[in-house]
Amino acid sequence: MNQVELTKIKQKALEENIPIIMDDTLEVVATILKEKKPKRILEIGTAVGYSAICFSKYIEDDGKIDTIEREEQRVKEAKINIKKVEVEEKIHIYEGDAVEILPTLNEEYDIVFIDAAKGKYPFFLSQAMRMIKKDGIIIADNVLYKGYVMSDYNKHKQRTAVRNLREYIAEITQNPNLETQILEVGDGLAISRVKQK
């Protein structure tokens, strides 16, 4: 992996205000990946490919990351970035809306990483539960959403996102098949481990 190029990708994304995974969040996820050594990861929300590239360090040699992105420009940039860092054989980008693409996937994943439209988190969860392996882990970023989710925030603009993130948190904390912790790193990180049946 070309570390110099990776640093440049991060720098450019930050300069252009493209939302990428925060350093402290990445640190937590990297720890999980090191311990899990996943073979297959599903990422919902590619942006410019930065997180997928970072995750690719920790998958098995013949492992694969499937990542979904609907914005055409981001997909183009992600493809260029993945090539620059020389990990294109490990990462596959599905181009389009995750709401349409997810139901067509029938893979089994060790890890699902959710970092896309906040208003769709409950739907993403139902799809993740369908494809996650029996001892898999579902990780969702930005679940506290600038603190709005845990406050009595009710402004119209973000109301749907906040309501759906609250629903997501309720589902992952009440589901008897999941063991969930919510960490106050970055913008809130939810880690849900599937309990061994």
Image (cartoon, rainbow, N blue to C red):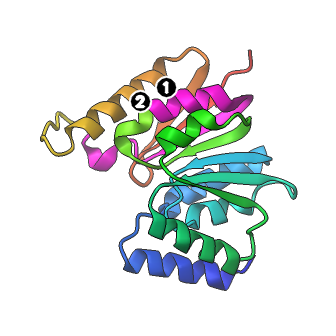
- Dividing the picture into quadrants, the one containing residue 2 is bottom right
Please tell me which residue lies in front, 185 or 80: 80
Question: Magenta region: which residues?
Answer: 123-148
Residue 16, placed above or below residue 135: below
Counting from the top left corner in percent of width and height, residue 45 is at 50, 53
Local SS, label 1: helix
Q: What whole-number distance in Å separates the C-alpha atoms at marks 2 and 1?
A: 6 Å
Q: In the depicted view, which residue is nearer to us: 34 or 161?
A: 161
Residue at image coords 49%, 60%: 21
Residue type at mark 2 is: Tyr
Q: Residue furthest right?
A: 62
Looking at the image, which is closer to me, 80 or 85? 80
Q: Residue at x 49, y 62 (%)?
A: 47
Whether residue 92 is situated above or below residue 6 in the rendered picture: above
What residue type is disc 1 on? Ile
The residue beneath circle 2 is 168
Question: Do the CB atoms of the residues marked 2 and 1 lie less than 8 Å apart?
Answer: yes
Asked if residue 22 can be seen in this view, the reply is yes
Task: Read off the residue under disc 1.
Answer: 172
Is residue 138 highlighted in magenta?
yes
Left or right for 54, reference 1: left
Task: Give x and y (percent) for residue 9.
Answer: 54, 78
How many numbered tags mark residues here?
Answer: 2
The N terminus - image quarter: bottom right
Q: Does residue 38 sit above or below 150 in this rendering? A: below
